[in-house]
Image (tube, helix red, strand yellow):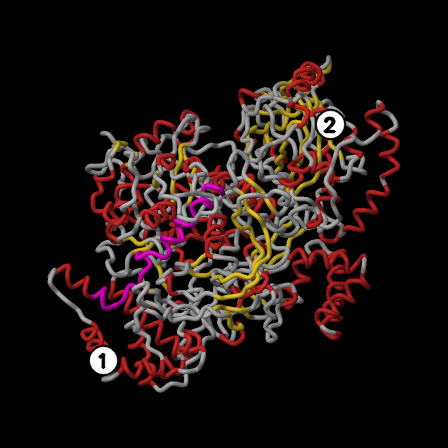
C-alpha cells in the first residue's frame, strides 16, 4: 500500500511543481520552521509533547506560513505544525478554503483512492465520483456563524451537484445565498461547531466542524446535505489557528483521516497581524490543556 | 440546610484516636466525607491510611474529561451515563450493572431526600455536596471538594521533604458521588439548560440525548444517538475513582439488601465481584458494533484493562482481591529502570533528571537499578514497584489521558504503517509528571494509598469470623470459634476432613500456593498455614508465591497471559521491569509470546470461600447474573456461555445450566465456593464455556456512504468475522484478537512486494505453512480485484487466517485448565474443599 501511494505521489509531483510556480515567492518554498527529526514508520515519529517542549514555535515562524506553502511540506511536518497550535477563537464570517495533499496531489480525484487504500480490489462498490465531488466542495469556502455555533459551506457553482441529481430545491425550502467579494454563492452542508477532541493530538482541544447531525440544523436539505452526515460520509473536520485569520484543518471521513485543508480570511489576517506579532496572544474558546504551550516570540 | 461546615476533627472522635497526628488547625470537613472518616475509625486506620482510602474512593485525577469527551470522541466508544446512573432505577443498579449504591445518596422525591424532583438533579441521585455542585451546572467557578482535602503529614524521611511541596489537592478532583460508589460527577460549565430542555423535554430527562436513531442504511447498520453528538453538552462531567472497580461488599458483614447497603457493609480493596464495568463503558453503543463486541463480554467482576490502550489481545481479568498485602511476596534483585526521587539535577541530562519548577529540590532521576519489587497484574507485568503499580491504575481509569497517553494509543482505523496511530508507542512517565498536574497530585500521595493497601482494611475475611458476625446480629454475645467452623465443615465433608485437607494442600498445592520458604524448598511437612506473623499480626502465609508459571503448564485460558502492553515499544513499557521482559517465551505456544509474556503468577488463595468463581477470568464455576427487571440490561441473558465442546455451538436453552443470581451473603458466597471447587477439582464435570459471537461482525476500515439514492454504497473495505466457521462457533474474542492491520498490510504487500512477504511468512511459520499463507494471500488479492465484496467470501474460504495466523490468541475454552488435583480421591477433594474454607 505504501509503495503504491508513493508512486501516486510521484506521478502528480509535476502537477504540483506547476501549481507552485504560479504563486507569490513565499508560496513557492516550504515555510522555514523547526521540526523534530522523524523516521518513516509510525513509531519513528516524535511524541508531540516532547516536540513542543524541544521545538517550540515562534510567532515569526507562524507568519512564514501561507495558505499555499503548507502543501510543500511532508505530512509529518504538517502534523508537527498542527500539534503545536491551539484552537484559538472560533472564527466568524466567510473564510476561503483549500484542501491539500502534502508534497503531492492536485486535491482532485484523490479522495476515493485514499479512502480505499492501495488495493483497488479491497473497495466495495466504490462511490468515488461522489466522494471526490464532496472534496471539491467541502474544503473550499465556508461561512462561520460563531454565535450560533454553526457553519455552512459556500458553493459557487451548482452545476456539478445538479448534474448528478444531488440538489433538492423547492419554494418551501429555497437555497440560501450569500455574496462574497461580489460573487453570489449558495450555502449548503450545514455543520455544527464546537470545541472537541482532536483525533491527532489529544493534548488540547480543536475546533470541530461536525456534519454528523446536519439534519438537525436550520436550513438542512436532505440532498445534498445528508451526504456529509452520519449516514453519508460521516465527515468531521478539526481546525486549529495558525494565526488570526488562518487556520489549519484535518478532514476525517468516518474517523479516517483523508486530507488537510486551510481556511483563510485576508482581512482578519491583516487586521490581527501587528497585535499577534507583538503579544502572541489571542482569545481561546477551547480547552488549552495543561502542557505549557511555548510561543517563543510572544514573550518579546 | 448547611452541608459544608467547619468541624474540628473532634466531631469524629472515634477517628481521632488512631490518628493522633491530625492537624492543629480546624480543617474543613465536607458532609460527604463524614462516613469515610467513620469507616477509617471502624477499620482502625491512621492518618496516612485514611487519606489513602479517601483518595482511592473519590479521586478521579481529572478523568471526568476522559469519560465525557475523550472516550466518546477520540476512542469512538459511547457511554450512556444516564442509562447506568438514572435515579429512577437506583434499586436496579446492582442487579443490572453490579454497581454499589452510595448509602448517602437518595432518589429525588423520596422521603427525606433533599431534592424533590428529578429535574433538580438532572435525573441522577441526590448526594451530599450537591447543594453546592448543582449551583454550578452550566457555570464556571465550582470549587472542588478535594481542595479541602486534609493531607496526612508528610512521611518522615521523604526525599522531597521536610517542606510540604505536594501538588495542590484540588487536582485530585473529587466532585460528588453519582449515587454509584466510585463514579463521581462534576458540573459541566458548558451546559446550556435551555438547549437541554429543548432536546430532552425536561431537565431531568436524557431521552432526546440517548434515544436510538435508526441508521438510514437499514437495520444492518448500528443505530446511533445524540450521545455521538459532541455539540451536546450534558449537565455533568462523569469521572471514575479507582473504587469504581475495587469497592466491594464486606464478606464479613454483607448488606441485608444489596441495593440498599449501609456504610459498614462497604470495603475498599477486595474488588467488586459483580461489577459490569465493561458493559458500562459501552452502554451507549449498539450491540452490533465492533466496540460493543470487543468490550461487552467480560464476566461480572472482570475487566479488560487493555481494551482502551488496545493491544488487540482480548483478555478480561478479575479485579484482584487485595488481602494481607504486608505478607505478599516480593522479589529481590530485579532490574528496574524508573524515576526515583532526588533533590538535585545539577550536571545531569534533562531527559533523565527533572526538577519541578517553582519547588525546592523536588526532582526525579531515571536510572536502572536492582530493586525488590512486587509482581502485580495477572502475569506480574506491573513490576517496577508497588507505588508505580498504583500510579498506573490511574491511567486505567482515564486520568491524564489527553496530556499523556491518548497520543500513544493504536487507532484501529489507521491502516497505514507510516501514520501515527498505526500501533502503540510508549507512555513517558517523565513527560506525564511534567505536563499533567493530576499526575503529580496522585504521585505526591501514592504513599498514602500504599499505606491504605497495607492497612487493616485489607486483612483477611475468614469464614469463621463471617459466620460469627452473622450470629451476633441476632445475639451480640454469640461466638463461633475455629473449632465450631471445623465441626460444621466436617459434618459436611467428613470426619477429619480439615486436617486431611491440610495434608493434601501441602503436598499438592503448596508448591505454588504458599509463600512460606519451606514450600519453595519442598519441605511440605514443615508448613504451617495458620501461623501468625508477629510484626503484621496477619497470617504468615499469603497462600500464593506470586512467581511466574508458564501458561501452558497451568493450562488456563491463555489470552490474558499474552497481553502485550508492557513489552518494549508498547504503551506501558515503563511499568515493566527488565527482568520481566527477559523471561523466555512459553515454548509450547503457537501464538507470539515474546517480551516476557506467556506467564501467570501463582495467585493467593486467601479467603477463597468469598471469591468464587475462580480463575483470572471468573470462568470456573457457575455463571453469575443479576436478573434485573429491565431486560435491556440483562446481559447474561444476551450471551449464554455453555457450548458443545466439539462444535463450539451454544447448547440448547434447555441444556444451558442456569446462571446464579448475585448473592453477596455469607452463605451465598459459600455455596458458590463449593460449586466452583467441585468444578475445579473435577474437570470432567465442567461444561465448556465460550463467549460466542451471536451474529456476524463486520470490521469496517475506511469511510462508507449511504446517500439515499440507492440501497447502499460503501467506500473502503470491510472484513467480516462470521459467527460460524467450518461448522464451529467463533469466540467473540476472535474479533478483538484479529490482527487486521497486519493482515491488510500483508495482503497489499503480497501484491506489491511478494518476495519480501513470502520470505517473512516462511521465516515466521516454516516453509510449508508460510508458503500456504502466501499463496492464500495472493489468491485473495486476485479474488477481491475481480469481485465486489470478494473479501468477505475469500476469508470465509480460508478461516484459519482469521482464527489463527492473524490472531494474537486463538484459545477457545474459557474454563479449561488448572486440572491439578483431578486425580485425587473424592474424599481428598472434599477434604481440600473443607480445608481451604478455613483460610
List the single residue furthest toward the bottom: B825
Q: Where is residue B260 drawn, in percent x and y?
A: 25, 49
Res. B774 in view? yes
- Nearest-to-viewer mark from 1 and 2: 2
Q: Nearer the viewer, residue B168 or A209?
A: B168
Q: Position of residue B469 (x, y in %)?
A: 19, 62
Left/right placement of residue B648 relative to residue B300 reads right
The numbered disc on residue B490 is 1
Q: Quadrant of residue B738?
A: bottom right
Q: Position of residue B537 (x, y in %)?
A: 29, 64
Q: Is residue B452 magenta?
A: yes
Instruction: Report the span colored magenta.
Output: B439-467
Label 2, on which residue? Answer: A61
Q: Is residue B268 left or right of residue B392?
A: left
Q: Relative to residue B691, is residue A92 drawn left or right?
A: right
Is residue B262 on the magenta stretch? no
Instruction: Pick whichever, B154 or B329, lies toward us.
Output: B154
Which of the 4 quarters of the picture holds residue A9? top right
Pointer 1 chain: B
Element on which disc 2 rests: helix
Amino acid at each position: 500500500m505504501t509503495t503504491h501511494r508513493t508512486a501516486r505521489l510521484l506521478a502528480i509531483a509535476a502537477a504540483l511543481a506547476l501549481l507552485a510556480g504560479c504563486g507569490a515567492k513565499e508560496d513557492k518554498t516550504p515555510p522555514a520552521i523547526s521540526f523534530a527529526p522523524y523516521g518513516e514508520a509510525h513509531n519513528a515519529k516524535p511524541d508531540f509533547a516532547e516536540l513542543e517542549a524541544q521545538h517550540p514555535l515562534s510567532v515569526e515562524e507562524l507568519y512564514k506560513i501561507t495558505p499555499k506553502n503548507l502543501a510543500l511540506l511532508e505530512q509529518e511536518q504538517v502534523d508537527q505544525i498542527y500539534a503545536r497550535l491551539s484552537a484559538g477563537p472560533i472564527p466568524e464570517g466567510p473564510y476561503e478554503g483549500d484542501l491539500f495533499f502534502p508534497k503531492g496531489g492536485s486535491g482532485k480525484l484523490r479522495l476515493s483512492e485514499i479512502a480505499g487504500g492501495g488495493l483497488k480490489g479491497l473497495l466495495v462498490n466504490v462511490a468515488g465520483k461522489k466522494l471526490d465531488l464532496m472534496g471539491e466542495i467541502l474544503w473550499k469556502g465556508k461561512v462561520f456563524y460563531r454565535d450560533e455555533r454553526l457553519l455552512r459551506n459556500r458553493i459557487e457553482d451548482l452545476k456539478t451537484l445538479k448534474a448528478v441529481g444531488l440538489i433538492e430545491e423547492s419554494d418551501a425550502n429555497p437555497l440560501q445565498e450569500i455574496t462574497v467579494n461580489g460573487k453570489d454563492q449558495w450555502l449548503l452542508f450545514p455543520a455544527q461547531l464546537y470545541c472537541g477532541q482532536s483525533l491527532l493530538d489529544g493534548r488540547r482541544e480543536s475546533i470541530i466542524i461536525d456534519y454528523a447531525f446536519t439534519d438537525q440544523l436550520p436550513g438542512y436539505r436532505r440532498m445534498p446535505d445528508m451526504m456529509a452526515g452520519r449516514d453519508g460520509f460521516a465527515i468531521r473536520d478539526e481546525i486549529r489557528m495558525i494565526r488570526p485569520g488562518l487556520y489549519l484543518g484535518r478532514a476525517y471521513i468516518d474517523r479516517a483521516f483523508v486530507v488537510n485543508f486551510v481556511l483563510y480570511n485576508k482581512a482578519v489576517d491583516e487586521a490581527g497581524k501587528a497585535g499577534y506579532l507583538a503579544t502572541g496572544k489571542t482569545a481561546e474558546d477551547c480547552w488549552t490543556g495543561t502542557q505549557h504551550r511555548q510561543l517563543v516570540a510572544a514573550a518579546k | 440546610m448547611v452541608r459544608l461546615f467547619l468541624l474540628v476533627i473532634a466531631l469524629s472522635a472515634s477517628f481521632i484516636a488512631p490518628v493522633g497526628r491530625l492537624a492543629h488547625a480546624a480543617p474543613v470537613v465536607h458532609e460527604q466525607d463524614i462516613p469515610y472518616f467513620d469507616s477509617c475509625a471502624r477499620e482502625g486506620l491512621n492518618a496516612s491510611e485514611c487519606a489513602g482510602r479517601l483518595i482511592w474512593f473519590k479521586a478521579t485525577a481529572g478523568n471526568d474529561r476522559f469519560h465525557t469527551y475523550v472516550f466518546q470522541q477520540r476512542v469512538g466508544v459511547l457511554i450512556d451515563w444516564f442509562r447506568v446512573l438514572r435515579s429512577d432505577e437506583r434499586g436496579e443498579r446492582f442487579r443490572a450493572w453490579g454497581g454499589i449504591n452510595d448509602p448517602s445518596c437518595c432518589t429525588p422525591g423520596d422521603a427525606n431526600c433533599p431534592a424533590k424532583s428529578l429535574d433538580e438533579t438532572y435525573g441522577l441521585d441526590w448526594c451530599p455536596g450537591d447543594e453546592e455542585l448543582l449551583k454550578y451546572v452550566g457555570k464556571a467557578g465550582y470549587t472542588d471538594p478535594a481542595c479541602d482535602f486534609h493531607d496526612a503529614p508528610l512521611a518522615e524521611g521523604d526525599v522531597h521533604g521536610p517542606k510540604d511541596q505536594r501538588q495542590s489537592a484540588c487536582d485530585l478532583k473529587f466532585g460528588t458521588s453519582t449515587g454509584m460508589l466510585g463514579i463521581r460527577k462534576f458540573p459541566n460549565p458548558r451546559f446550556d439548560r435551555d438547549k437541554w430542555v429543548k432536546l430532552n423535554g425536561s431537565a431531568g430527562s436524557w431521552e432526546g440525548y440517548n434515544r436510538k436513531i435508526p441508521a438510514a442504511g437499514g437495520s444492518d447498520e448500528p443505530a446511533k444517538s445524540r450521545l455521538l453528538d459532541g455539540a451536546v453538552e450534558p449537565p455533568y462531567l462523569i469521572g471514575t475513582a479507582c473504587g469504581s472497580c475495587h469497592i466491594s461488599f464486606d464478606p464479613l458483614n454483607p448488606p441485608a439488601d444489596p441495593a440498599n447497603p449501609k456504610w459498614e457493609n462497604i470495603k475498599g480493596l477486595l474488588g467488586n465481584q459483580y461489577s459490569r464495568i465493561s458493559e458500562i463503558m459501552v452502554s451507549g453503543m449498539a450491540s452490533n458494533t465492533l466496540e460493543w463486541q470487543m468490550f461487552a463480554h467480560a464476566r461480572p467482576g472482570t475487566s479488560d484493562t487493555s481494551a482502551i490502550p488496545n493491544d488487540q489481545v482480548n483478555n478480561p481479568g478479575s479485579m484482584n482481591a487485595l488481602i494481607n498485602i504486608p505478607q505478599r511476596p516480593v522479589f529481590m534483585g530485579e532490574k528496574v529502570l524508573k524515576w526515583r526521587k532526588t533533590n538535585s539535577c545539577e550536571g545531569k541530562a534533562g531527559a533523565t533528571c527533572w526538577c519541578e519548577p517553582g519547588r525546592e529540590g523536588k526532582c526525579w532521576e531515571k536510572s536502572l537499578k536492582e530493586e525488590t519489587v512486587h509482581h502485580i497484574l495477572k502475569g506480574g507485568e506491573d513490576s517496577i514497584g508497588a507505588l508505580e503499580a498504583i500510579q498506573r491504575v490511574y491511567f486505567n481509569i482515564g486520568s491524564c489521558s489527553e496530556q499523556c497517553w491518548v497520543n500513544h494509543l493504536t487507532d484501529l482505523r489507521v491502516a497505514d504503517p507510516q501514520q501515527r496511530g498505526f500501533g502503540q508507542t510508549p507512555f513517558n512517565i517523565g513527560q506525564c509528571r511534567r505536563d499533567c498536574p493530576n499526575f503529580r497530585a496522585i504521585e505526591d500521595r501514592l504513599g498514602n494509598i500504599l499505606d491504605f493497601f497495607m492497612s487493616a482494611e485489607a486483612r483477611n475475611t475468614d469464614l469463621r469470623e463471617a459466620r460469627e458476625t452473622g450470629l451476633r446480629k441476632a445475639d451480640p454475645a454469640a461466638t463461633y470459634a475455629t473449632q465450631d467452623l471445623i465441626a460444621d465443615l466436617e459434618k459436611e465433608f467428613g470426619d477429619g476432613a480439615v486436617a486431611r485437607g491440610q495434608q493434601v494442600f501441602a503436598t499438592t498445592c503448596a508448591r505454588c500456593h504458599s509463600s512460606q520458604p519451606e514450600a519453595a524448598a519442598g519441605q511440605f511437612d514443615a508448613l504451617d498455614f495458620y501461623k501468625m506473623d508477629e510484626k503484621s499480626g496477619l497470617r504468615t502465609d499469603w497462600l500464593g508465591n506470586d512467581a511466574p508459571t508458564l501458561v501452558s503448564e497451568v493450562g488456563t485460558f491463555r489470552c490474558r497471559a499474552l497481553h502485550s502492553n508492557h513489552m518494549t515499544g508498547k504503551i506501558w513499557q515503563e511499568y515493566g521491569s527488565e527482568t520481566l521482559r527477559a523471561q523466555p517465551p512459553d515454548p509450547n505456544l503457537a501464538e507470539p509470546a515474546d517480551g516476557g509474556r506467556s506467564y501467570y503468577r501463582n495467585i493467593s488463595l486467601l479467603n477463597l470461600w468469598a471469591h468464587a468463581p475462580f480463575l483470572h477470568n471468573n470462568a470456573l464455576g457457575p455463571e453469575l447474573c443479576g436478573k434485573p427487571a429491565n431486560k435491556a440490561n440483562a446481559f447474561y441473558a444476551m450471551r449464554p456461555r455453555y457450548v458443545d465442546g466439539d462444535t463450539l455451538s451454544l447448547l440448547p436453552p434447555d441444556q444451558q445450566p442456569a446462571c446464579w443470581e448475585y448473592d453477596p451473603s455469607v452463605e451465598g458466597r459459600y455455596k458458590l465456593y463449593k460449586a466452583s471447587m467441585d468444578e475445579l477439582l473435577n474437570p470432567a464435570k465442567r461444561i465448556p464455556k465460550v463467549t460466542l459471537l451471536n451474529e456476524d461482525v463486520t470490521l469496517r476500515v475506511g469511510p462508507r456512504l449511504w446517500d439515499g439514492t440507492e440501497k447502499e454504497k460503501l467506500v473502503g473495505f470491510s472484513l467480516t468475522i462470521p459467527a460460524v466457521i467450518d461448522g464451529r462457533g467463533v469466540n467473540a474474542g476472535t474479533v478483538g484478537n484479529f490482527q487486521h492491520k497486519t493482515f491488510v498490510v500483508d495482503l497489499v504487500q503480497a501484491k506489491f512486494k511478494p518476495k519480501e512477504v513470502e520470505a517473512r511468512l516462511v521465516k515466521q511459520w516454516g516453509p510449508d505453512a508460510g508458503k500456504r499463507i502466501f499463496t492464500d494471500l495472493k489468491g485473495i488479492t486476485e479474488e477481491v480485484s475481480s469481485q465486489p465484496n470478494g473479501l468477505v467470501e475469500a476469508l470465509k474460504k480460508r478461516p484459519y487466517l482469521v482464527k489463527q495466523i492473524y490472531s494474537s490468541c486463538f484459545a477457545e475454552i474459557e474454563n479449561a485448565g488448572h486440572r491439578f488435583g483431578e486425580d485425587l480421591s473424592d474424599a481428598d477433594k472434599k477434604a481440600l474443599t473443607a480445608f481451604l474454607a478455613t483460610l
